[in-house]
Image (cartoon, rainbow, N blue to C red):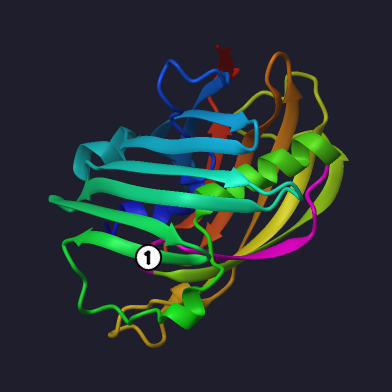
Amino acid sequence: MKWCSAFVLLGLLCGVGRAAADPLPQTAARYDVFVHGLRAMVLDAAYRNGDGRYAVAVEGKTSGLVGLFLPGNLHLRGVGTFTPAGAVQPALYDSAGRSHHQNWLLDMVYKGALPVVQRQQPPDPQREDVPDQARMGAVDLLAVFMQLLSQVGATQRCTDATSRIFDGERLSTLSIHSAGWGPLPAGFVETRGKDSLKCDFVFQQVQGFKLSSKSTALRKPQPGHVWFQNLPGVGMAVVRLELEHPKMGHIVLTLNALPQRRD
């Protein structure tokens, strides 16, 4: 999990939906992840959102030189509902993958407002515990993204908010606010002639650190930006994300191709 965990924040942009029998349409897309300008991972994305519920997951695989020298994969899945007021209520969150020649997995369910880890392999006794009181009311990153996507689709802006996030091991905060409309920055994805909604965010881990890393750089705030565009047949969708990771440096995620809407 060590290497892939750096991409968990990026993984909130993606998903694999429910079974084909689900009446909700599925949005599917592919994203490229670049680290210092080099492509490091490809993320296949799909999600379902409507009728007060959502289903989302991540399928990622290292690529380029990173994939050649450090092969790995990442799988995330989340399911939940929305309250009539629009607040997200996750029901489950799973993560699994392979990195550093080791398989890992984590299963988490929600008992009311409390996220509870049911299974973790391998266990990590060298990481500080996050007590129930601190986890109460926290949600996973996929749930936060689905709520953000719903808000952006409904209001055309990012509602100023701070979320508490628990991924099964780490407790973090995510603060986000709108930064206005404008063109995408020059980079790896074409603008397609559309203005984009830019939202600024700050991600910061606050608990669940390695016991041996009291002064780790991961304790520092991680600033970033995310851009949305209103795409034909899809609606508001993420087209770009930039993040300053304290260890990996500048990370950019870009849309590889126009998303597809599938019934």
Q: Percent position (x, y) of residue 66?
A: 29, 42
Residue 166 within the segment the image draws in magenta: yes
In depth, the one of 70 and 166 nearer the eye is 166
Q: Please tell me which residue is depicted at 49% across the width and 41% down the height of the picture.
A: 37
* Crowdedness near tag 1: few (<14), some (14–19) or many (≥20) residues, C-alpha within 10 Å: some
Boundaries of the magenta span: 157-169
Look at the numbered disc 1 and give the secondary structure of its residue.
Answer: strand
Q: Is residue 128 above or below residue 184?
A: below
Query: Split into 4 quadrants, where in the image is the C terminus?
Result: top right
Residue 58 falls left or right of residue 23: left
Residue 212, visible in the rendered structure:
yes
Residue 47 falls left or right of residue 49: left
Residue 9 within the segment the image draws in magenta: no
Query: Split into 4 quadrants, where in the image is the N terminus?
Result: bottom left
Residue found at the far left of this picture: 101
Q: Please tell me which residue is depicted at 47% across the width and 71% down the height of the picture.
A: 171
Residue 41, visible in the rendered structure:
no
Q: Percent position (x, y) of residue 259?
A: 58, 19
Amino acid tagged 1: Val
Q: Is residue 246 above or below residue 10?
A: below
Q: Please tell me which residue is depicted at 20% across the width and 78% down the height of the picture.
A: 125
In depth, the one of 219 and 173 nearer the eye is 173
In depth, the one of 238 and 136 nearer the eye is 136
Q: Percent position (x, y) of residue 50?
A: 64, 30
Q: Please tell me which residue is depicted at 38% across the width and 88% down the height of the picture.
A: 214
Which residue, given by chain and number where applicable, does mark 1 sit on? 116
